Image: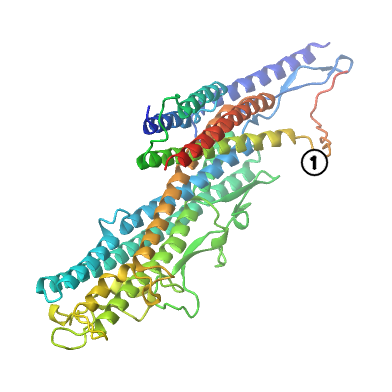
């Protein structure tokens, strides 16, 4: 064995261990870097054949990242779920006060107050104070509908702005991934710092929208919105944009348009947004809000209620006689040019006075307080002319309150579960990153057994609770 | 102990378990199992604990407790799915999508011994 061969072997070994130390040092330095996964130094054995001068020893290989893409995906998915539910919870939080479930404020309170004023008027149809109270409560109801419409419009504006800024953030993050691809192409080798930054970017991006990231064989990353719409391919980036959209020949021409997401070619890709903050915002903006305030195709629950109340009150009053024997004047007025404008324009008719309110029903049979009595029962009436979708006015309103309440509860529960699942997924990722694959498998299997045992106990507790619920009357 | 008190104590225990699960380590999972066993005992109650005389407010406490259990069940289900997926991926390593053994590509830099 020659001296030169020995020295060469020693130098290689020293280089290898120096590189191992560098890797360890890099791990320590980056311990708190977002998105960083520990690196493992690899040492390759060298051929040993003394006769031909191959003396074995070790040579440093490329450092391997212990990043586990499956766990990364799990964290990104949960982050997307959290973004979705948080956006929904925030949007719905602005709507919920309009439909106060306690009935102390909002439209429910105003409607109940008006029906009570009709009832008091029916008990004393000639009372000037009772008539004045009817006008006052009707005015309050009109204001209440206008205020509700105004709150919904304000929430709509906020959500629309948030959609715009979320799309801008997605485009910024996609630009960062594009920059990563360009840098990776230029450097040609894996860089742990760059890799950490990339994974941090992908995690943030999935909190905003469900984006599929594919690691290509050339080391670049391809980003697809909902697995379909390209955001980044190699060195190319494709920007998204949000735009207002009203279909051709809308049923309600002045209604607030919906928002859609368009790809770089202006094609509608809203259906490809399947998670993250953007998905939650679009749900609130294009489903929840239109169901209440209407859009180009539907009137919306708030307008349906406002229209039914105004029309039926006016029809009943018109069928009666005021104290001077004239036909009753209408109590309410609203903009009838669009079904989506009723709530925001509902007000008491400027020509009505306490004296032109018609309590007298000319019959037959004639009833002195017949109209006032019919008005006081209008809220609970199930006559076909008084109902909305087969429900009495108050039942329909209560139904809307329940729907909003359920949506708020569902978003809030989803947010809680997603937050905890995200924390869990991050904890599992931290726990398994940095150990050997075999150790990872043992750790995860042990965790799986533990979770299964807990799950069985939860099933028992759930069953016990259901039994108790059935026992309590 | 009234049904309402049991529900309140149970809900506090569920909160503890839910928080503990955020640090998924085998010893923590064992602790959670013990806590849930105690919770089952709490729900089953002592022979003298009244259930039949429970009122409507007790039912609302029970429903709230039930909702909390379902949230915890979802949290655990998510964690189980996460582990299950990882294990499946791990077990499928070295096999093709059709279940046949995947032949490893030769590595030119591999070491030799003579």
Query: Which structural element holds mark 1?
Result: loop
Q: Quadrant of residue A363?
A: bottom left
Toward the viewer: A223 or A188?
Answer: A223
Query: Is A422 situated left or right of A473 in this image?
Result: right
Q: Quadrant of residue B6?
A: top left
User: Is residue A349 visible from the viewing direction of this image?
Assistant: yes
Q: Position of residue B73 (x, y in %)?
A: 53, 37
Toward the viewer: A414 or B47?
Answer: B47
Toward the viewer: A289 or A35?
Answer: A289
Quarter of the picture containing the N terminus of chain A is: top right
Categorize mark 1 by other alpha carbons within 10 Å: few (<14), some (14-19), many (20+): few
Q: Position of residue A116 (x, y in %)?
A: 22, 65
Q: Residue at x 37, y 68 (%)?
A: A392
Toward the viewer: A268 or A184?
Answer: A268
Q: Residue at x 55, y 36 (%)?
A: A196
Furthest-left residue in this view: A128
How many marks the image carries: the answer is 1
Query: Is A51 situated left or right of A179 in this image?
Result: right
Q: Position of residue B36 (x, y in %)?
A: 50, 27
Q: Position of residue A6 (x, y in %)?
A: 77, 13
User: Is residue A426 visible from the viewing direction of this image?
Assistant: no
Q: Residue at x 59, y 38 (%)?
A: A72
Q: Is residue A357 above or below residue B110?
A: below
Residue, disc 1: B96
Q: What colour scheme governs how the chains and residues are painted in the rendered image of this protein?
A: rainbow
Q: Is residue B10 above or below residue A357?
A: above
């Amino acid at each position: 064995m020659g001296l030169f061969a020995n020295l060469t072997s020693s130098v290689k070994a020293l280089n290898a261990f120096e590189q191992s130390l560098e890797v360890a040092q890099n791990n320590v330095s980056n311990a708190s870097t977002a998105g960083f996964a520990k690196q493992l130094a690899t040492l390759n054995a060298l051929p040993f054949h003394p006769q031909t001068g191959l003396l074995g020893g070790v040579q440093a290989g490329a450092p391997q990242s212990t990043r586990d893409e499956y766990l990364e995906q799990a964290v990104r998915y949960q982050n997307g779920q959290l973004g979705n539910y948080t956006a929904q919870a925030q949007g719905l939080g602005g709507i919920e006060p309009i439909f106060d479930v306690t009935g102390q404020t909002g439209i429910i309170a105003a409607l109940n107050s008006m029906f009570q004023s009709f009832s008091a008027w029916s008990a004393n149809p000639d009372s000037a104070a009772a008539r004045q109270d009817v006008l006052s409560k009707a005015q309050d109801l009109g204001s209440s509908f206008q205020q509700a419409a105004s709150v919904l419009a304000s929430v709509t504006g906020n959500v629309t702005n948030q959609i715009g800024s979320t799309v801008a953030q997605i485009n910024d993050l996609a630009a960062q991934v594009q920059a990563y691809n360009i840098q990776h192409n230029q450097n040609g080798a894996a860089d742990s710092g760059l890799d950490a930054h990339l994974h941090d970017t992908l995690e943030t991006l999935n909190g905003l929208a469900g984006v599929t990231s594919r690691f290509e064989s050339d080391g670049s990353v391809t980003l697809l919105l909902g697995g379909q719409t390209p955001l980044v391919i190699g060195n190319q980036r494709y920007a998204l944009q949000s735009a207002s959209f009203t279909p051709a020949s809308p049923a309600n021409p002045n209604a607030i348009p919906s928002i859609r997401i368009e790809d770089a070619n202006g094609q509608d890709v809203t259906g490809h947004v399947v998670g993250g903050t953007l998905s939650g915002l679009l749900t609130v903006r294009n489903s929840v809000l239109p169901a209440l305030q209407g859009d180009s195709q539907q009137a919306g629950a708030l307008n349906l209620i406002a229209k039914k109340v105004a029309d039926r009150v006016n029809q009943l009053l018109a069928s009666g006689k005021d104290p001077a024997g004239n036909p009753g004047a209408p109590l309410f007025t609203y903009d009838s040019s669009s079904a989506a404008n009723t709530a925001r324009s509902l007000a008491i008719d400027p020509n009505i006075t306490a004296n032109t309110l018609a309590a007298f029903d000319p019959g037959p049979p004639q009833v002195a307080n017949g109209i006032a009595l019919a008005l006081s029962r209008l809220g609970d009436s199930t006559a076909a002319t008084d109902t909305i979708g087969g429900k009495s006015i108050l039942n329909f309103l209560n139904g809307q309150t329940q729907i909003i309440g359920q949506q708020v509860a569902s978003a809030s529960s989803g947010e809680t579960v997603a937050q905890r699942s995200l924390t869990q997924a991050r904890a599992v990722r931290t726990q398994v990153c940095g150990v050997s694959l075999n150790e990872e498998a043992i750790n995860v299997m042990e965790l799986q057994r533990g979770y299964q045992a807990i799950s069985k106990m939860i099933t028992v507790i759930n069953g016990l609770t259901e039994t108790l619920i059935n026992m309590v009357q | 102990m009234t049904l309402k008190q049991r529900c309140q104590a149970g809900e506090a225990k569920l909160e503890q378990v839910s928080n503990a699960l955020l640090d998924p380590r085998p010893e923590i999972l064992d602790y959670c199992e013990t806590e849930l066993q105690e919770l089952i005992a709490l729900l089953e109650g002592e022979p003298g604990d009244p259930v039949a005389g429970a009122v409507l407010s007790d039912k609302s406490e029970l429903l709230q407790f039930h909702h909390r259990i379902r949230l915890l069940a979802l949290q655990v289900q998510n964690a189980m799915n996460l582990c299950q997926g990882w294990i499946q991926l791990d077990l499928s390593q070295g096999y093709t999508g059709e279940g046949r053994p995947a032949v490893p590509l030769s590595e030119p830099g591999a070491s030799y011994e003579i």
